[in-house]
Image (tube, grey):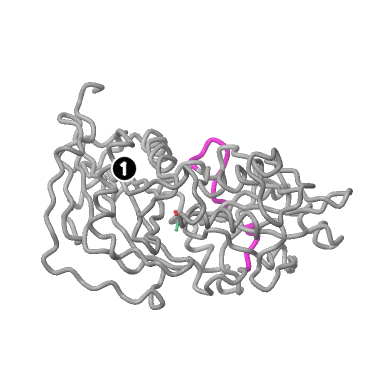
Amino acid sequence: ATSLPDIQPGRLEIIRNEKPIPPPPSRTLKFGHTFTDHMLTIPWNAIEGWGIPKIEPYGPFQLEPSSTVLHYAQTIFEGMKAYRDETGKVTLFRPDMNMKRMNNSAKRIALPTFDGEACLELIKELIRLDRHWIPREPGHSLYVRPTLIGTQKYIGVAPPSEALLFVICSPVGPYYPNGFKPIALYGTTEYIRAAPGGTGAYKLGVNYAPGVMPQKEAAALGYAQNLWLHGPEHYLTEVGTMNMFVVLKKEDGGFELVTPPLDGMILPGVTRDSVLTLAREHISGKNKLDQLTDNLVVSERPITMTEVKEASLSGRLVELFGAGTAAVISPVDRIGYLGEDIHIPAGEDGMGSVSRPIWKELVGRQMGSIESDWSVVV
Ligand code: COI
């Protein structure tokens, strides 16, 4: 199987949308509801490998009702964002990380792997064609959603002999309907998202559907999202739409930036990695961030709800925020836990003294106003 053709950008066929629609004004966008004029599709089968890539009008495609994706959730996805600056320059943020993670996800559920760089070339081609769809308002971008599904006509449980990789694009603003304001989380003790040896560290569709009903229950109680906990100790894991960070005051007056370790149960987020890298480069002096204290340590370590609650009561809890591609950095101002609310200090904009400077640098690098090799020209 190793000698089968990989993705071949040179064979791209483009079918232009004859009925393009004008992009709606950014202020009317609701996350994930609007799609651009075109999509990218690349078929695969076990005999011929990756086939002819096509950029074609966004629209429905035909699937066998027996397709493996529809029965056994043979589907993986990625989320990345493209930005457009005042000069018209278009960039993607660390897209190599997404291509790598997508291949890891593919391996985990026996979908075909592919040349990430070749796929990225095609994604860039798609973004170039629909570049006028990229919103330019602060906090807005083009959300790019690569997806890979098993399409074989077969209801046995096995690696599919046919698959389809497709990429759609959606102009977006903030992920949460309350805009950029702090959100409330529900520390969930009735259900779990992942378990040791499970699939929590991979971006599989199957990790998301079971969270929808618990999220409905959390919403009915007034919380935006479930904070997934692990074990009888109630270790913080992640939120499903983002990784978690906690800032604690140290004995000496400095700060500790804590995030749960990559233990196989949480998604290795690109934004998570970016926040950790920026904080560590500040500490090492490689890249000092304005307004950020030097008395800072970074810990990837387990942290329990008891520790968060005690820190809140003793005044040691400085801030708590989520980090994700869709969510960017989302401050949290309370967590419902075992029938009460843990209150978290949050400033006007929700950001605190540690997250604000990191957020500024992150967003600057994403939008391209701060130059870095994380920003890839499209
Ligand atoms: C992302 O942040 O890109 C994600 O994939 C989360 C998604 C559920 C919106």
> x and y percent of residue 102 in the render?
39, 40
Which residue is outermost to the front? 87
Please state the quadrant of the image where ligand 1 appears: bottom left
**What's the residue at 58%, 51% (across, down)?**
243
Q: Residues within 10 Å of mark 1 (few under 14, many from 20)?
A: some
Viewer-side residue, 351 vs 334: 351
Q: How many marks?
A: 1
**What's the residue at 64%, 51% (across, down)?**
229
> In the image, is residue 2 above or below residue 118?
above
> x and y percent of residue 265 in the render?
56, 42
Q: Quadrant of the N terminus?
A: top left
Viewer-side residue, 33 vs 192: 33
Which region of the structure is painted magenta?
Answer: 184-199
Disc 1 is placed on an element classified as helix
Residue identified by numbered label 1: 120
Viewer-side residue, 181 vs 374: 374
Judged by its main secondary structure, the magenta piece is loop
Residue 123 belongs to the span the image colors magenta: no
> In the image, is residue 148 above or below residue 227?
above
**What's the residue at 72%, 47% (across, down)?**
303
Residue 191 belongs to the span the image colors magenta: yes
User: Does residue 339 appear left or right of residue 169 in this picture?
Assistant: right
> x and y percent of residue 59 in the render?
19, 61
